[in-house]
Image (cartoon, helix red, strand yellow):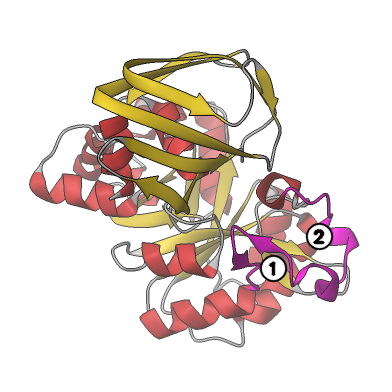
Amino acid sequence: MLILGHRGCAYFPENTLKSFMEALKSADGIELDVQKTKDGVLVVSHDENLLRLTGIDKDIRKSNFDEIKDIKIQGEKIATLEEVLEIIESTGKFLDIEVKNPEDFKDVHQVLKRFKLKEYIISSFWHENLYQLKKENPHIKIAFLYVHQPTKSELESYLKKSDFLKPNFLYINEIYEEYYQRLIAWTVNDVEKARFFKNKGIFALISDFPDKILEGLKEEKSMFFSNPYLSYFIQMIDRNSIKRDEKTFSFEAINYVMPLHIEEINIEGGKIETNKNIPFLWNQGERIRFTITIEDDPKIKIRVREIGEVSFSLKDIQKALV
């Protein structure tokens, strides 16, 4: 079973060179997303717009590369696909390239032909466009990406056209029993679930924390994230902003998800402060500083209008950041 880093890893800004390099220290490979600028440069980004990651409302596909190349994501530059391919070529590790726009398949293939990669796949939600690329270039390995539970006949149709299937792990059930060797599951941040997939002989899984998954599998540790929202919160934390001493732990977090209405923040075993008055709207791309005064092992509870109450301990956060 291959362990692939999701957009690199959660310890550094997603889809950046720093995130990929960190993931590749332990992972078998990485997964990334591609967008194309107005003047045809392929850059590594999940979103078309840079607002979520940078706070700057700039549409990649409507901008020339020179207009966005100096915009930073927590101090990291926007990576081009070629820069990442150079890294993958030098390491010989596995690469999963997700194409976000149907207009970009041929451009991605043209860039790939300039590199000697050991093993890679191209994946996408755009199944028919991806399949057409496969028919024109039979040597390419492709993966159909989807977020639903297919019927048996639909699954068999996918398998006839695609080398691999790439479903969200929540939708994987007994219908896949014969096909695990052709599955790439995303996004698995739970060691217990990873162990289940490994025992089933799955081809690969994608994780925000490939190092923790590998460590847990090797040492037979139990579940890493009992609370899935913790993994999202960890990804929001700017590690360069962390400050700590014997009594306090503070950091800045950047909202990468969606606008969130923070209605209440409570803490047991300490005190927590933010640089905004509660309740507040936490916009995409906005930084919030959290300062925690430590008394015991603080248990943090945050009530968010969009998802309800989430809770985790300070030790959970610190353990994930080590």
- Residue at position x 26%, y 47% in the image: 213
Is residue 239 at least partly visible in the picture? yes
In terms of depth relative to the viewer, which is nearer, 49 or 170? 49
Give the magenta-colored segment's residue range.
Answer: 55-80
Task: Report the residue at 31% width, 30% height from top.
Answer: 314
Residue 37 vs residue 302: left or right?
Answer: right
Give me the disc on residue 43.
1
Q: Is residue 57 magenta?
A: yes
Q: Do residues under tags 2 and 1 come within 8 Å of each other at their CB atoms?
A: yes
| Structural distance between the alpha carbons of marks 2 and 1 | 9 Å
Question: In the figure, residue 228 lies in which quadrant?
Answer: top left
The three-letter code of the residue at mark 2 reads Ile
Q: Quadrant of residue 198?
A: top left
Where residue 143 appears, x then y in whole percent?
54, 54
- Can residue 187 be seen at all in this image of the molecule? no
Residues 46 and 111: in front is: 46
Q: In this figure, which residue is indicated by the disc labeled 2?
A: 60
In the picture provided, is 205 more to the left or to the right than 283? left
Point out residue 216 in the picture as x, y percentages from the top left corner: 18, 45
- Helix, strand or loop at disc 2? helix
* Amino acid type, label 1: Val
Measuring from the top left, give residue 160's x and y in whole percent: 54, 49
Q: Is residue 128 above or below residue 119?
A: above
Q: Is residue 257 magenta?
A: no
Residue at horizontal 34 percent and vertical 36 percent from the top? 248
221 and 321: which is toward the camera: 321
* Residue drawn at point x = 81 percent, y = 73 percent: 65
